[in-house]
Image (cartoon, rainbow, N blue to C red):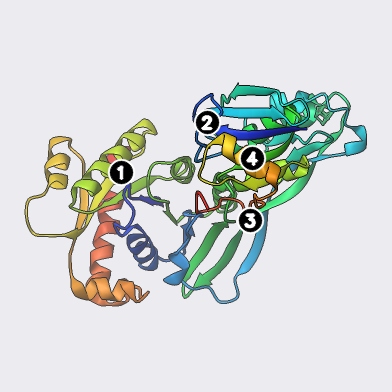
Amino acid sequence: MKIAIPVEQKKMDSMVSATFGRTEYFLLMDLQTQEVQFLDSPFCRGQSAGIQTAQLMIDHQVGVVVTARCGEKAVRLLNAGNIQIFQAVKATAQENLEFYRAGTLALLQRPDHVCIYT
Amino acid sequence: MKIAVLSGKGGTGKTFVSVNLAYIQEQVTYIDCDVEVPNGHLYLPMKEPAVQPVYLPVPSIEDSLCTGCRTCIDFCSFHALCWTGSRILHFEQNCHNCGGCSIVCPTKAISEKPYSIGNICTGSFEHVGVMSGSLNPGQMQGCAIIRKMIAQTRDLKNLVLDCPPGDSCHVVQSILEADLCILVTEPTSFGASDMRICIDLLKLYNKPFGIIINKSLDTRNQIKTFCRRHNVKILAEIPLQPELASLNASGQIAAKNPEYRRVFERIFKNAQALIHQQNQ
Ligand code: SF4
Ligand code: SF4
């Protein structure tokens, strides 16, 4: 299974992006093989970014998304694709991965979370 | 006469002008085309209005026939169709109801079902016929509601079409069949700037139009200068008056007062003269 985190830069110690659909990059990690891949997100500009980004997750066989926030429509599609959505903490992608593994991240409470970081 | 009332900037008094201009006429229907926030009914409340829902066709997907080929997704420019990994998911709010996906689906898995986007209330207030469209929150297809109201009143002679502010597609849809457009503005920079945008739109659609300067102060202002320079007809100036403002703010029809009635009768006469001029 893969985990996806929207990131500001293509590196492990990048901060998590403030958005999901408008992020420029994603960090993808295969949780079994530990293989890391950085993905350019083509949807950071233009319309329906959330829906298209959620589709990108499904097409990359992502099972878990860790994000600061997520819009209503993206949440609907991610849910329909059985992708779990966790609330990112204000830290690097690396640290968020560790929190996820330790089981200390909470599920995203509701779409379009107004508070960007908990 | 079918009169559309526009404003460019919101809050200039477009609904104020529309309801009063309707009220001074006989055998007239007021249509609220500002379907995102209709407020004409506050001035012209209808007793027991007839409510008709407005539906648009949206795709309905038979999962058992779907092979997951994604032809429909690639076709839809509005990203209203998505693949969840096991089935197609449809986002009604993104759908523009073009029907294309049901045509391109190779297995005929897509048919169409009606989806409610809002409603139209029809009734009357005293002698004025009233029609008010309302778009459900989150929906984008207000033009469909406006189009339906215009189609249903096509045979009526006297209409006042209260348009949304701005120069959006909703405004374009609302003015298409108008004989004359009245642009309500106010003597502020914002009012002048948005008025110019609307004038460009009205010229594009070749509509005869005139200006009403609402909340006017008895001084020179940029609206008057602009109109003089560009040969744009000013139909009326309605002075800034606390009494008139509070009458309007309490939801009253100002034209019930004979003094204000004369103001709107004059506007109506000037509008008729403008059309007459055009036709010569
Ligand atoms: S009807 Fe048109 S806009 Fe709606 S989902 Fe189908 S292709 Fe997309
Ligand atoms: S085009 Fe038809 S068969 Fe192909 S994915 Fe869409 S609904 Fe399924």
Question: In this figure, which residue is indicated by the disc labeled 3?
Answer: A109
- CA gap between label 2 and label 4 equals 12 Å
- Kindly identify the amino acid type of the residue bearing the numbered disc 2: Asp
- CA gap between label 1 and label 3 equals 52 Å
> Looking at the picture, do discs 4 and 3 lie on one chain?
yes
Q: Chain of mark 2?
A: A
- CA gap between label 1 and label 2 equals 61 Å
Question: In this figure, which residue is indicated by the disc labeled 1?
Answer: B209
Quarter location, residue B215? bottom left
Question: In this figure, which residue is indicated by the disc labeled 2?
Answer: A13
Residues at circles 4 and 3 in contact by the CB criterion of under 8 Å: no
Measuring from the top left, give residue A82's x and y in whole percent. 78, 42
- CA gap between label 2 and label 3 equals 25 Å
Question: In this figure, which residue is indicated by the disc labeled 4?
Answer: A98
Q: Chain of mark 4?
A: A
Q: Is residue B62 above or below residue A114?
A: above
Q: Is residue B164 visible?
A: yes
SS of the residue under disc 1: strand
- Kindly identify the amino acid type of the residue bearing the numbered disc 1: Phe
